Amino acid sequence: MLQGQKKAANPLMVVIAYIIIYVVWGSTFFFIEKALHSFPPFILGSFRFVTASAILMTYCAIKGYKLFNKRSVQEAAIVGFLLLFVDMAGVIWAEQYVSGGVAAIIAAAAAIWFILLDKPKWKENFSSISTVLGVALGFCGVVMLFAEQIMSTNDNTDGTLKVIALSILVLGSIAWTVGSLISKYFKKTEKQEKEDLHVMVKTAWQMVTAGILFNITALFTGEYTTFTLSSVAPVDWFNLAYLITFGSILAFSSYIWLLQVRPAMEVSTYAYVNPIIALILSHFFTSHVVTSLQIFGLAVILFSVLLMNWKAYRAKLSARSKSRKVLQLENKLDTNPITESELVH
């Protein structure tokens, strides 16, 4: 097998997994917005991640995975705090004031922060004109969304809340980036690598961390004093169940599996599709109006993400082309062996 080539997988399963991460992850912004009709934001996060972590940890125990390693749990807690608590708390809280479609567009702009905060790759990233242009264009797209939200309301208070919500979404995506980079550059010895927990177990610990922190925050903000289970509409129990099973378990499991069988750059294309799904759902199934400026802002941000990854895409295509030529040459040599006299000449 050529270096970097992913192991073969059932093509139908690959297609199904892609549909899940494209559609389900894009739809979670919509289901969060709907569930907020009955659940306060931090209680919603608490119920979602406590339940999802319990289900995932039980699954890992049944599979016989090792469930505890102090160093791995500490790493998972740090990553879980930044990715699943800070970022998701920002998304859930912000969707009280902006639509799920707008939240998804801001999330798509996270590529900007990966370029700006990945210090070891600064030299490589900023030597590429397409990457620099992509970052600048991405910022323009985000500013465009801020302007659109300000112009869409005549109420100063409402406008201020929308700007605060957008700012929190941006800060949340920065936290997601920092957590991802910490996970990426977390150094381990060979012994620690062998003792490390399975990725699904670490994900469960990340969810445990988020669930506990959401619960503590809900207690401190007084959400439990006014919340009653009887006040939750039946449809919102369904919305919560969807976020737990499809958003937090099924989609993430599909994502992890795809990374094992398909190139990471190909899998990352979900970032282009998720905000489109979110905008479509927001337009047809909520009272929010999807404006032409939002659509244009989305197009600008997605094009900026393409530019930021253009150098990597070209490198990947070049590597694939070289691999294909090597395979063709090997096949040619197998069918038409070169004789000793041909080698001499």
Image (cartoon, grey):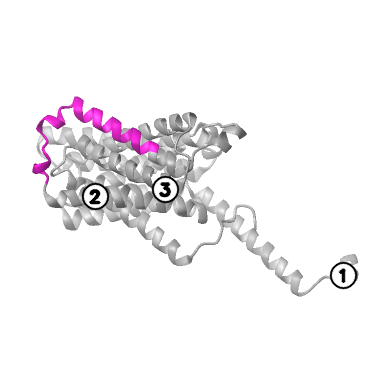
| Relative horizontal placement of residue 147, taking residue 326 as reference (left or right) | left
Which image quarter holds the C terminus? bottom right
Q: Position of residue 327 (x, y in %)?
A: 67, 64
Q: Which amino acid is tagged 2?
A: Ala
The segment highlighted magenta reads: 205-232
Q: Mark 2 or mark 1: which comes first in sequence? A: 2
Q: Mark 2 or mark 3: which comes first in sequence? A: 3
Q: Secondary structure at mark 1?
A: helix
Query: Residue at point 25% right, 37% down?
Result: 46
Front residue of this view, candidates 235 and 323 = 235
For the question of whether residue 101 can be seen, the reply is no
State which mark lies toward you, 2 or 3: 3
Q: CA distance from mark 2 to mark 3?
A: 22 Å
Q: Position of residue 9 (x, y in %)?
A: 51, 62
Q: Secondary structure at mark 3?
A: helix
Q: Quadrant location of residue 339?
A: bottom right
| Relative horizontal placement of residue 261, taking residue 171 as reference (left or right) | right
| Relative horizontal placement of residue 92, taking residue 180 as reference (left or right) | left
Give the prevailing secondary structure in the magenta stretch: helix
Which circle marks residue 62 in the picture?
3
Q: Quickly name the residue at label 1.
A: 342
For the question of whether residue 323 can be seen, the reply is yes
Q: Which amino acid is tagged 1?
A: Glu
Q: Position of residue 2 (x, y in %)?
A: 65, 56
Q: CA distance from mark 3 to mark 1?
A: 61 Å
